[in-house]
Image: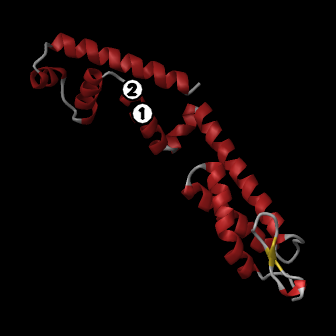
């Protein structure tokens, strides 16, 4: 059997090559999409972000396909660079709380995580006050505790949240 008859892949498994011809863009896409998605998923942790990075890399590749000498290598470098960009953006968001306004879901999830760290009695009060929109007297009646206890525990909970969220956003 002749070795030029066998299709081979580069070390990433991304780009099929043959001894005679260069793969078409469609062939490259079919062969390389899954390995590139796995690579990106390992780097950015979420499949959604990984899919976005890989699609951007294929778009860049498509625009230059006729001039790129090593399509598999170019694609792999594009995916890695796209992942770096995504991770850099993620780090910046953690450092700059003012930019978080654009990412309400990220902020919401962060606050929920911090609320889960509170003692149970404080979590209940925060939930009743801010989720259920109950007043201090309604909470006191509901839980059968003095209104002063509601106010002091709620104050401690809010202070703890401000401190923990403020420290992590610096």
Q: Quarter of the image holding residue 131?
A: top left
Residue located beneath label 2 in the image: 117
Asked whether 96 or 56 is in front, the reply is: 56
Q: Position of residue 27 (x, y in %)?
A: 73, 81
Asked whether 18 or 154 is in front, the reply is: 18
Q: CA distance from mark 1 to mark 2?
A: 7 Å
What element does badge 1 sit on?
helix
Residue 29 in sight from this viewpoint: yes
Asked whether 114 or 102 is in front, the reply is: 114
What element does badge 2 sit on?
loop
Residue 20 in sight from this viewpoint: no
Q: Are marks 1 and 2 in contact (CB under 8 Å)?
A: yes
Work out whether 51 lies above or below 104: below
Q: Position of residue 2 (x, y in %)?
A: 89, 88
Q: Residue at x 36, y 20 (%)?
A: 158
Q: Position of residue 123 (x, y in %)?
A: 29, 26
* Rendered image: mark on residue 166: none
Q: Residue at x 69, y 52 (%)?
A: 83
Residue located beneath label 1 in the image: 113
100 on left or right of 133: right
Work out whether 116 lies above or below 75: above
């Amino acid at each position: 059997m002749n070795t030029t008859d066998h299709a081979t892949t580069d070390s990433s498994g991304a780009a099929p090559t043959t001894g005679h011809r260069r793969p078409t863009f469609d062939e490259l896409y079919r062969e390389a999409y899954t390995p590139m998605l796995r690579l990106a998923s390992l780097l950015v942790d979420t499949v959604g972000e990984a899919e976005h990075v890989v699609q951007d890399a294929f778009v860049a590749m498509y625009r230059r396909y006729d001039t790129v000498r090593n399509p598999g290598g170019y694609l792999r470098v594009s995916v890695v660079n796209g992942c770096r960009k995504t991770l850099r953006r993620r780090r910046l968001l953690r450092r700059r709380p003012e930019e978080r306004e654009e990412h309400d879901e990220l902020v919401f999830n962060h606050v929920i995580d911090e609320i889960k760290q509170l003692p149970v009695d404080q979590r209940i009060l925060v939930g009743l006050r801010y989720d259920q929109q109950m007043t201090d007297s309604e909470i006191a009646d509901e839980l059968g505790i003095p209104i002063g206890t509601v106010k002091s525990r709620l104050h401690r909970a809010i202070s703890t949240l401000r401190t923990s969220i403020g420290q992590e956003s610096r």
